[in-house]
Amino acid sequence: MADKPTLTTTAGAPVPDNRNSLTAGPRGPLLLQDYQLIEKLAHQNRERIPERTVHANGWGAHGTLKITGDLSRYTCAKVLQPGVETPMLARFSTVAGERGAADAERDVRGFALKFYTEDGNWDLVGNNTPVFFVRDPYKFPDFIHTQKRHPRTNLRSPTAMWDFWSLCPESIHQVTILFSDRGLPVSPMHMNGYGSHTYSLWNHSGERYWVKFHFKTQQGHKYFTNAEAAEVIGHSRESYQEALYGAIERGDYPRWTMQVQVMPEKDADKMPFNPFDLTKVWPHGDFPPIDVGVMELNRNPDDYFAEIEQAAFSPSNIVPGIGHSPDKMLQARIFAYADAHRHRLGTHYEHLPINAPKCPVHNYYRDGEMNTTGCRTGNPDAYYEPNSFAGPIADPRAKEPPLAISGDADRYEHSEGNDDYSQARALFNLFDDGQKERLFENIAESMSGVPEEIIRRQLGHFAKVHPDYADGVRVALGIR
Ligand code: HEM
């Protein structure tokens, strides 16, 4: 008894009884003055926050990024200099499932990383695939609706998915990855992560390089077939949580090799396709991946809600030496995430310990709901800018070089020749017979119940990738 702390109310007063409500006599009704009971029930009523509109189901851990390569000619980012070690957080996720959905579902996996650098937080909010389904953010909310539940049936709708994909042929590259062997990893540790978008690096001389970030698993790739996944889900809906948590508890720390592909700024114009198009990869032959460092996950969260559910990642979080690119999807994401966090977590979501930078933070933002920090200027008289009271001032050294790419404002149709098929074809041609067979079967299984008109439209896209692709799916579907 003596060595246990005293239970208190939220105001710190000792609680004399945590089991019996205050009532008017042993058999009498409750008294409204039992504020301790009311506080307890009120807290339970407020335990849930809105889940993420996408990527709601997730698993995460803490770790470190250690830079072993040398990118100093491309970037002045301190986090990327040789030998630097940076604490970090990773959250993996599926896209469509709600919180509590089965982990081993065929879906794209989120691969969100937050690096607590000395120049502020750098977030790389990627996926386990190097490309995405659409190239214009205008389509993103509609795409996500097709992945979520049908408003009337409250069921996932293969018809909606295949209707959208068949009407948006730029999706064929990502669709082929999703239904291939790599579309259903056995655990977060056995998949790669990709920043996916083109970002940029810039150095002290003001030179900018376009860059793709990759994280290659050191555990080896491992994937489930649909049948294996069904078996796993039959036993556990939490297979990813078990695998990641278990590995770290055992000291079996998962690692990824960080790599970059680099393109000089001016070379973007010479590419046969738009290097800022998220439906495209950069060929490794032209842009060989360069080893940069190692990311290791080595600490489980003590509290899932505080450290993973409340984690707020945003592509707008960059640091000097790392920049964005004209990728239209990325540009929309620069807006969308902080907006989502202000709604999901509150205006001051960066005051939460998991989101707070580990470097000093100075700004003139004031007040607001759940503001936990008070004065952030170092002097209460400096509560506006400019001021004469030694308040924080902007540092022009953090200025990014200007983007060399710009043009007239318009709503451009930016598919550039509409070649949605050649990269999907290159991928298809890499598959051996067994991989192709499983791709056909996975697609056929997913198309069950989809109207014939939609199936035929999609078969047309498969045929444009490769006649064998369409034929294979047709056979698997049992249609002529
Ligand atoms: C225009 C396109 C996109 C928009 C508007 C968008 C928007 C969002 C929003 C609103 C969230 C929920 C954030 C939260 O509540 O915490 C989210 C989560 C996420 N998105 Fe996107 N997204 C887009 C495209 C992408 C792409 C292309 C990727 C990967 C390359 C991606 C990866 C993720 C990941 C990994 C998460 C979960 C982050 C976490 O673990 O908390 N998204 N997205």
Image: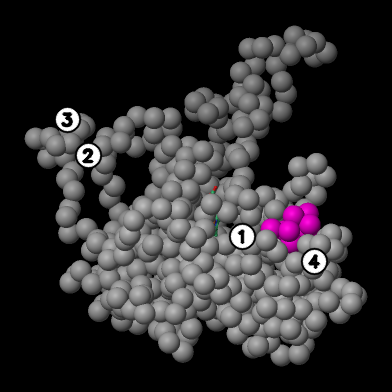
Tag 3 or tag 4, which sits nearer the N-term?
3
Q: Residue at x 63, y 12 (%)?
A: 33
Residue to which mark 3 is pinned: 381
| Residue 64 forms part of the magenta stretch | no
261 to the left or right of 174: left
Residue to which mark 2 is pinned: 377
Residue 46: x, y in percent? 62, 32
Which disc is residue 380 wearing? Answer: none
Image region (quadrant) for ligand 1: bottom right
Q: Quadrant of the N terminus?
A: top right
Residue to which mark 4 is pinned: 455
Note whether 174 is above or below 96 in the view shown: below
Chief SS of the magenta region? helix
Tag 1 or tag 4, which sits nearer the N-term?
1
Residue 478: x, y in percent? 90, 75
- Report if the beta carbon of the residue with label 1 is closer than 8 angstroms to ligand 1: yes
Tag 1 or tag 3, which sits nearer the N-term?
1
Which disc is residue 93 wearing? Answer: 1
SS for dot 1: strand
Q: Residue at x 81, y 62 (%)?
A: 453
The answer to which quarter of the image holds residue 389 is top left
